[in-house]
Image (tube, rainbow, N blue to C red):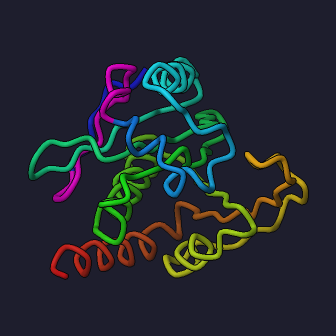
Amino acid sequence: MNHTSLNGGAVRLVPLSTDHAEALFPSASDPAVWRWMPRPRPETVAQTRALLGEMVDDPARRCFAVRRRDDGAVIGSTSLYDLDLSEGRAEIGATWFDRSCWGGPYNAESKLLLLHHAFADLRLARVALRTDNLNVRSQRALTGLGLVYEGTLRSHMRRQDGTRRDSLYYSVLAEEWPGVRDRLRDRVAARTTA
């Protein structure tokens, strides 16, 4: 269970709950938004609620709803998962945003807030992110932020269409975080003023 909200200029990450199902359903049920997600796309608010329930009940997750600061709207979700405090590691994932928010500062600032939380508050040594081998846009974004490509897990999981996906892994270590943080801050600033 989360107990901490994370505050930025454009977004506020608040602890996720099943009460966010109705607000998140339009984006979670959008095929374009859900395209790269490895789990089935929810088709009802009840399925969205069940998905969120599974996420928040997982003790190795810190799940957040993303609220836009200027109007309070819930525009997406993101999580730290496979959190292992004794080993000092986690992954960022289960991230999606309403299509109307693509290209804005929201995803970049969410990553900035999550990574700051991971390294400053939780004192993690590493944070990883993974992406589908076909998701070139995500791969470019991760390398552009300074994350290090670590390798590919071949035939790692099944896509929604039944085909097998290779997962590309990227990571940032605590000592690399200041450089990544600066790139994220620059990206948020550029997208906020654009």
Q: How many marks?
A: 0
Residue 104 drawn at (x, y percent): 29, 69
Displayed quadrant of residue 58:
top right
Question: Would residue 52 appear left or right of 8 to someone viewing this image?
Answer: right
Question: Would residue 103 appear left or right of 173 to someone viewing this image?
Answer: left
Pick the front one: 49 or 184: 49
Pick the front one: 172 or 80: 80
Question: Would residue 111 appear left or right of 131 to someone viewing this image?
Answer: left
Magenta stretch contains residue 140: no
Q: Quadrant of the C terminus?
A: bottom left
Q: Which span is picked out in magenta?
A: 8-23
Pick the front one: 1 or 75: 75
The extreme left residue here reads 70
Using the image, determine if residue 25 lies above or below residue 162: above
Using the image, determine if residue 181 lies above or below residue 85: below
Pick the front one: 193 or 160: 160
Question: Would residue 6 appear left or right of 99 to someone viewing this image?
Answer: left
At x 33% / y 28%, what residue is drawn? 22
Displayed quadrant of residue 63:
top left
